[in-house]
Image (cartoon, rainbow, N blue to C red):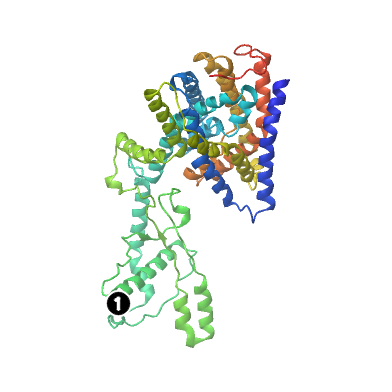
Amino acid sequence: MTQVVDVVEAAVPLLGLMLTGYCFARFRRKAFPPQSVFLLNSFVFLLGIPSLVFKALATKDLDKLSWRFILGYMLLRTVFGLLSAVPLLWQKTNDKIGDFLINLISSTWINTVIFGIPMLESLYGPRVKILNVLAAISSVIYQLPIMLMFFEYREVLKNGSGNGSRSGGAAELRSVRASAAKTQDEALAMNQVSISSLNRQEVPQQVVPPDTRDAHVVHEALQYQQHQQHHQHQQHHQQQQPASADEEVTMYTAANLPHTSSYTAAISNTNSGRNSSDDSNNSSSSSNSNNSRGALVAAATIAPVDGNEAEDDTMPRTFFGVLWIVIKRVIPKLLRNHPFVGICLGLLWSLILRMAADENNFPKVIDTFVQYFADCVTPVASFCTGMFMCGHERDVIRMWKPLLVFLLAKMIAMPALAMLVCVIVDLDGIEARSAVLLASLPVALASFTLITTYMKERPSAMALTSSLIIVGSILMPFVFAAWNELLIAGDVFGDIPDGTTYTG
């Protein structure tokens, strides 16, 4: 019962911080606009967490680190990730990689630092913080690179940057170009512009295109616009490239555009043509000006938006060629990932000092400076989580069915699997119980950042992730306390008396 009180005393301030953040985002929007969530989260991600993991590792002897704990969490993330892919074998979907990543992030990207540190410290003392950092190592050093490779591989396939996956979109584009060329004669006839008037550089009388409800007429309207551009080209003595049926300006409707991020479609329909035509019947003196304002702009510019893309015929056609593209994209992102850099620098600092001296002497000035940032992680991130909840409440209602499934997987199935993994890697005592308790924590706010970065075209994935963060954060104290009581009642991983602190 004593440990239940300790858990409650640690959880109530966290819930209070989240509630405060929610209230400020709801009722003080001028002081805390929506972009404040991004700014606060950036502070935690760029300065707070890197400082925390750096100091925890830099002041620790590498020989005394529980490498079996890291191995256990790597195994846990691997096994649970593979299990999350099993339902996709029977599920009919056009984006199996995306669905796999959603399942993986929603069940294994644990909030080990922000919530995990105060919750574990309430049970086993301040030195247990190193276990939170070791769990974070398994996510940042191991799981994050794997997820980024899958994300980038999905982007390569989606954008058609390899293996000929762009051929479908290219075939559609060639078909549209051919259809546009076929209607060129009809468009020129509709323009009613003579060659002599073009040579005299007279302004041709503009004819209002017909109603765009007919797809064939839309092509005619496109050719009308292209002819006007051709006339403008002649006036500028070939200083401007004309838009013809064989170039990138091609008629395309939004319904027929490939649903990928490698192409952008902008369709602008101007209805003033019909209004101008009606006005011209009432005023013959202004018929030419009204008709000129009635020109229809109905074209889509199709062009790759990813700077890493190249032409289809220059892309590698082999798996290893695509893999090389993915690796070249992932490595710079890892090197710009501040928690990744903080972990590497902490391990390097500890290794250098271990080779140069018998013990790690951390300068007090640096220690104090880094500790200031580290101490901000939990309060600022909890407040930021509360602000994030404001505006995403409807996601919980809208996604309640998959939300329930993922909550059961994350907070029930994953801790149960963690118990089995601890037996496999021979973890016992406080380390084993800490591994199980950390596995019961909700997904981190960084999971929403990953989803919004790589899956903007799937709002349901963003809604699911946000709902998992909201409900999981609220249920976190109760689930954590329940698992701790279950481990105590069954003397799982040995008898640990109340008040025992971690000394590893």
> How would you rate the neighbour count of disc 1 (Cα within 10 Å): few for under 14, some for 14-19, many for 20 or more?
some
Taking the spot 61% from the left edge, 26% from the top edge, the residue there is 120
Residue 252: x %, y % from top left: 42, 58
Query: Toward which corner of the image does residue 245 lie, by quadrant?
Result: bottom left
Position above or below: 259 against 447: below
Q: Give whichever of 116, 252 is nearer the camera.
A: 116
Taking the spot 69% from the left edge, 39% from the top edge, the residue there is 16
Query: Quick one: which residue is furthest to the bottom in this view?
Result: 285
Position above or below: 330 against 283: above
Question: Can I make out residue 89 in this image?
Answer: no
Question: Can I make out residue 411 in this image?
Answer: yes
Please give left or right for residue 185 compared with residue 17 in the image: left
Quarter in which the N terminus is drawn: top right
Q: How many marks?
A: 1
Residue 437: x %, y % from top left: 60, 24
Q: Give whichever of 245, 293 is nearer the camera.
A: 293
Query: Quick one: which residue is furthest to the front in this view?
Result: 364
Amino acid type indicated by mark 1: Gln
Task: Kindly state the secondary structure of the residue where label 1 is placed.
Answer: helix
Residue 201: x %, y % from top left: 31, 81
Residue 430: x %, y % from top left: 58, 18
Query: Toward which corner of the image does residue 320 lie, by quadrant?
Result: top left
Q: Give the labeled residue for mark 1.
A: 235
Q: Give whichever of 91, 12 is nearer the camera.
A: 12
Position above or below: 71 against 244: above
